[in-house]
Image (cartoon, grey):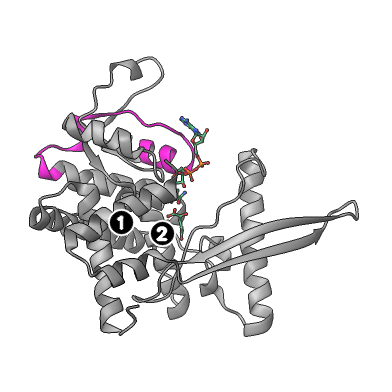
Amino acid sequence: MNALAATNRNFRHAARILGLDAKIEKSLLIPFREIKVECTIPKDDGTLVSYVGFRVQHDNARGPMKGGIRYHPEVDPDEHQTWELMHRLWQWILDEYSKFHGHSPAIVTGKPIDLGGSLGREAATGRGVVFATEALRNEYGKSIKDMTFAIQGFGNVGSWAAKLIHERGGGVLNRENAGKVRAKFIIEAANHPTDPEADEILSKKGVIILPDIYANAGGVTVSYFEWVQNIQGFMWDEEKVNNELKRYMTRAFHNIKSMCQSHNCNLRMGAFTLGVNRVARATVLRGWEA
Ligand SMILES: NC(=O)C1=CN([C@@H]2O[C@H](COP(=O)(O)OP(=O)(O)OC[C@H]3O[C@@H](n4cnc5c(N)ncnc54)[C@H](O)[C@@H]3O)[C@@H](O)[C@H]2O)C=CC1
Ligand SMILES: O=C(O)CCC(=O)C(=O)O
């Protein structure tokens, strides 16, 4: 099942748990705006190349919309060049927008620090995963140092998570010992890493899954902090960024748990019902229902 179908299925399940009005459910399911653009760019050899891009803005009932930018995975597999390319692209977006609207650093996040980026953003998703894991483990009266972790994928998120888990005394499995894994907990640090069928099988086995929409939200949270700093015209130090991130991740965990208790559901449905309910309430209050 693709990511969109799986997300829609989770959304519908959450809507049913919440007893959402059918008209609201339908209006929340349909994106507010989908834009398709075609960009024609001259290459160094003088020829023209055309790229198609999509922008989906889902819902702005609770405030401005923001999203991650995705590229085709084969654009540039070399990590260093990808980093360079990303920074040049961020700078280009900022320059083009600022030409028409004056210097506007808040319109794009993930920028280099010297162009108004936030301290702590690079590690934020991995750090958020660790804060989420700590919040979950506190529920079970254990700490990270009592546990062993198997991390799949060692890019930005995986490598930061591994480093921070190691600093807290947790063991990280490698190729040699990974075969021993009998996981009781799965922390979804990537987007949509568990298929809905696998989700059901694992849940029936009693495996506790911390869902992606919460567990990897540290990155977008610090991107939000970047936006906040840009519109304030004030730069936070890294300690403040990390402390705020911990506060947001811990508070969100408790909000999710309380939805789980009210609706007798698992953590994924706790996270979905929390989010859907907030957007539905704002939609009704703004009088936007279909
Ligand atoms: N970087 C961020 O701030 C955020 C990332 N995410 C999600 O987290 C995931 C990882 O993102 P990044 O670390 O930024 O990407 P990345 O490209 O830096 O790292 C991904 C790593 O996974 C490895 N990999 C690919 N397929 C694999 C497989 N089948 N088994 C094991 N390893 C595999 C790659 O070799 C690479 O080392 C993605 O799903 C991304 O959408 C979600 C929220 C924010
Ligand atoms: O930093 C952001 O705003 C988006 C990060 C991201 O791509 C994601 O959360 O999936």
Residue 193 appears left or right of 10: right
* Residue 169 can be seen in this image: no
Q: Quadrant of the C terminus?
A: bottom left
Q: Any magenta on residue 126?
A: no
At a point 67% along the width and 83% down the height, the residue shown is 100
At a point 49% along the width and 38% down the height, the residue shown is 155
At a point 39% along the width and 53% down the height, the residue shown is 124
The amino acid at mark 2 is Val
Q: Tell which tag, 2 or 1, sits nearer the viewer.
A: 1
Q: Quadrant of the N terminus?
A: top left
* Residue 131 can be seen in this image: yes
Magenta region: 138-162
Examine the rendered structure and indicate whether residue 251 appears above or below residue 9.
below
Residue at image mark 1: 11
Q: Position of residue 192 (x, y in %)?
A: 39, 44
Residue 272 appears left or right of 109: left
How would you rate the neighbour count of disc 2 (Cα within 10 Å): few for under 14, some for 14-19, many for 20 or more?
Answer: some
Q: Tell me: is circle 2 under 8 Å from ligand 2.
A: yes
Residue 124 appears left or right of 79: left
Q: Position of residue 76 (x, y in %)?
A: 67, 42
Residue at image mark 2: 220
The amino acid at mark 1 is Phe
